[in-house]
């Protein structure tokens, strides 16, 4: 399989090339077959590598292949090469597997759209860039994929560019991501120079990992913080999360692909890939965990008062990404990747379910104009229900296993992280509430749509519902690869990822070499009797059930309660409904501030200094020329007079000069 690594990103690239070159001269059927088949072949290749991994001992599960030398300049040498290990093969399976289902769903969802061919061209290019990001064997190749998914997100979010809101959302996503990417790029430079100062000039992940011990603690902290700035932008964390809700202006399959399974998880993957650097920087890891839990709580609170079903899911995505950063921030890298995988299943399903609802409701997005869809869209109803149970963390569903693992690791990593666990547990309850608020408001009660819309409500075609059912199955059973030891399982995914991450050590323990050595010698942190973990597991389930119960009371049993509560707490509701006015603040500080700064520079720098200097010089030359022009009168007698005067001056000088 080592010789086939390059095929994983190659097939989507081939689909992009074929549809770009000849797609306009072929039918829509040809375009969709090429696009879907490309992703499916990539998935089969990744599955083949995964199957071979299972036959090999853990230490042998690394494939790396160099294709050719890309850059050779001085001490810098970068190859086009691919690396597959336990981490990247899981990412490839998630990206290609969920991506294939989204491609199939798009065939039905985008049918009739005038940009049908262009849509699949962009989609294939996006998957190629994401696969390049997760399979590249060096930081520079990862950065190419990193920037590539940023470009594709701009193209896909602004796909309906005729709408100002869509084109503005695309530009917003592109610009905000550039802020984070600047930090990532500086981090690459700093890491290259820091290792180079120790005689190791490399950007290859394997070589960086083997030589990371040469970095000082301060250098590791600075480098990892810079990389985290990139992750904040790409994975929509505070303060660079503002692009993701606006990105819902793109087609719904785009929201599912970008904001559930691929682009927004790139930051989590990057930290997991560079775990050997982050484990050397406990201060950075604490920052990652704090930013993650604050983002999770903040975004979940905004979801309480939104009515656009895609916007609710967008803030849910931001919140769930916060959970992943909590995991990697406390050193539970495997738990973070586990939740990344289960999130791809249930959040991809939720977005596609929202698209199915829009399809049934003639494009309606406001849940206040929905309700009563349970009987008319039964497949969408039951698959959406499964996804809501999964994201709420109900036992037996995928989200329960991954989210509970994160909560337990956040609590047990050290006593100093108890507050992180508490805030994360409260956020889990909030998630259950606002997701079932969405579910009950959309599918239960009386239909609040117009009579014309009611007449056309129908279930989506099979090309859309079959991907929903497959994702519902994955959202149901996908978590069983991570059954914890407490429940009689082996946590197979953590065991599978162990060669990449090693034993998970509490962050604060990493400051004590003796504790670290003991933990590694015993295969990880010290065990426990399980009673505390079970108590916390029960507590998290009860919190989730409480959130669901409150949502049921508010939106099914007594639908008038939310309105009365909003009226009584109008000030708080106003702030939450308007997303705490963060967008307005950013608009004032950065957008208008930049425009005002531009006006200032236009007047002062350009108007006074640049134009003043250039035009002033021209005026001075013009005046000087005007004065000199008076000497050239055109009269012969004046020229003769000038010659005589000049001759007298020269002769006088020659006579007088020798006397001195």
Image: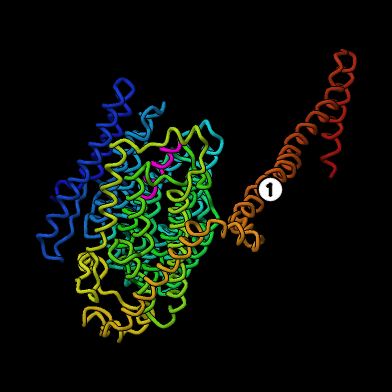
Note whether residue 20 is visible: yes
Protein image colouring: rainbow
Q: Could you tell whether 84 is left or right of 262 in the image?
A: left
Check if residue 353 falls in the magenta segment: yes
Q: Could you tell whether 286 is left or right of 537 in the image?
A: right
Quadrant occupied by the C terminus: top right
Position above or below: 309 against 558: above
List the residue tagged with mark 1: 597
Tell me which segment is drawn in magenta: 349-361
Residue 207 at x, y = what percent? 27, 62
Position above or below: 395 against 601: below
Note whether residue 575 is visible: no
Check if residue 619 falls in the magenta segment: no
Residue at 44% across, 69% down = 546
Question: In the image shown, does 157 or 204 lie closer to the viewer?
Answer: 157
Give the residue at the far left of this rendering: 55
Residue 602 at x, y = what percent? 70, 41
* Mark 1 Cα shell of 10 Å, populated few (<14), some (14-19), many (≥20): few
């Amino acid at each position: 399989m080592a010789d086939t690594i390059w095929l994983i990103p190659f097939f989507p690239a081939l689909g992009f090339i074929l549809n770009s070159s000849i797609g306009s001269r072929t039918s829509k059927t040809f375009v969709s077959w090429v696009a879907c088949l490309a992703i499916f072949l990539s998935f089969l290749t990744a599955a083949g590598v995964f199957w071979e991994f299972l036959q090999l001992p853990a230490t042998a599960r690394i494939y790396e292949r160099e294709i050719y030398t890309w850059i050779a300049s001085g001490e810098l040498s970068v190859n086009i090469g691919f690396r597959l290990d336990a981490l990247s093969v899981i990412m490839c399976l998630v990206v290609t597997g969920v991506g294939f289902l989204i491609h199939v769903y798009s065939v039905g969802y985008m049918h009739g759209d005038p940009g049908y061919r262009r849509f699949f061209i962009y989609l294939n290019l996006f998957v190629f860039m994401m696969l390049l990001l997760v399979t590249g064997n060096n930081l520079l190749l990862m950065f190419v994929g990193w920037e590539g998914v940023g470009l594709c997100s701009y193209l896909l979010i602004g796909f309906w560019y005729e709408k100002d809101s869509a084109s503005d959302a695309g530009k917003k996503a592109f610009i905000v991501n550039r802020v984070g990417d600047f930090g990532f790029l500086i981090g690459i430079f700093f890491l290259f120079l820091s290792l180079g100062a120790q005689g190791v000039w490399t950007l290859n992940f394997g070589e960086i990992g083997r030589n990371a011990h040469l970095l000082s603690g301060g250098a590791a902290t600075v480098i990892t913080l810079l990389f985290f700035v990139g992750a904040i932008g790409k994975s929509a964390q505070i303060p660079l999360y503002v692009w993701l809700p606006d990105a819902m202006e793109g087609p719904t399959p785009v929201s599912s692909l970008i904001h559930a399974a691929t682009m927004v998880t790139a930051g989590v993957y990057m930290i997991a890939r560079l775990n050997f650097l982050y484990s050397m920087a406990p201060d950075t890891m604490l920052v990652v965990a704090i930013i993650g839990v604050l983002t999770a709580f903040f975004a979940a609170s905004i979801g309480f008062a939104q009515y656009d079903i895609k916007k609710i899911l967008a803030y849910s995505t931001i919140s769930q990404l916060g959970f992943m950063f909590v995991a990697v921030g406390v050193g539970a890298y495997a738990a973070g990747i586990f939740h990344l995988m289960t999130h791809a299943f249930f959040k991809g399903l939720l977005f596609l379910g929202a698209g199915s609802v829009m399809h049934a409701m003639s494009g309606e997005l406001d849940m206040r104009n929905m309700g009563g869809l349970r009987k008319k869209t039964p497949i969408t109803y039951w698959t959406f229900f499964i996804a809501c149970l999964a994201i709420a963390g109900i036992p037996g569903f995928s989200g329960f296993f991954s989210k509970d693992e994160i909560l337990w690791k956040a609590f047990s990593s050290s006593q100093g992280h108890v507050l992180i666990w508490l805030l994360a547990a409260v956020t889990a309850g909030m998630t259950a509430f606002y997701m079932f608020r969405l579910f009950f408001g959309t599918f239960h009660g009386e239909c609040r749509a117009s009579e014309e819309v009611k007449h056309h409500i129908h279930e989506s075609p099979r090309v859309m519902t079959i991907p929903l059912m497959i994702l519902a199955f994955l959202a149901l059973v996908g978590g069983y690869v991570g059954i914890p030891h407490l429940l009689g399982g082996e946590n197979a995914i953590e065991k599978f990822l162990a060669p990449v991450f090693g034993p998970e050590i509490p962050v604060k323990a990493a400051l004590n070499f003796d504790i670290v050595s003991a933990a590694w010698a015993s295969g990880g942190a010290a065990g426990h009797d399980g009673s505390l973990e079970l108590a916390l597991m029960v507590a998290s389930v009860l919190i989730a059930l409480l959130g669901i119960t409150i949502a049921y009371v508010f939106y099914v049993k007594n639908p008038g309660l939310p309105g009365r509560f909003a009226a009584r707490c109008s000030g708080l509701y106003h702030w939450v409904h308007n997303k705490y006015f963060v967008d307005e603040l950013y608009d004032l500080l950065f957008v208008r501030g930049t425009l005002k700064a531009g006006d200032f520079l236009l007047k002062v720098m350009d108007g006074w200094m640049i134009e003043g200097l250039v035009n002033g010089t021209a005026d001075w030359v013009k005046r000087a020329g005007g004065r000199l022009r008076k000497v050239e009168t055109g009269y012969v007698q004046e020229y003769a007079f000038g010659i005589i005067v000049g001759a007298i001056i020269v002769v006088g000088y020659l006579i007088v000069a020798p006397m001195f």
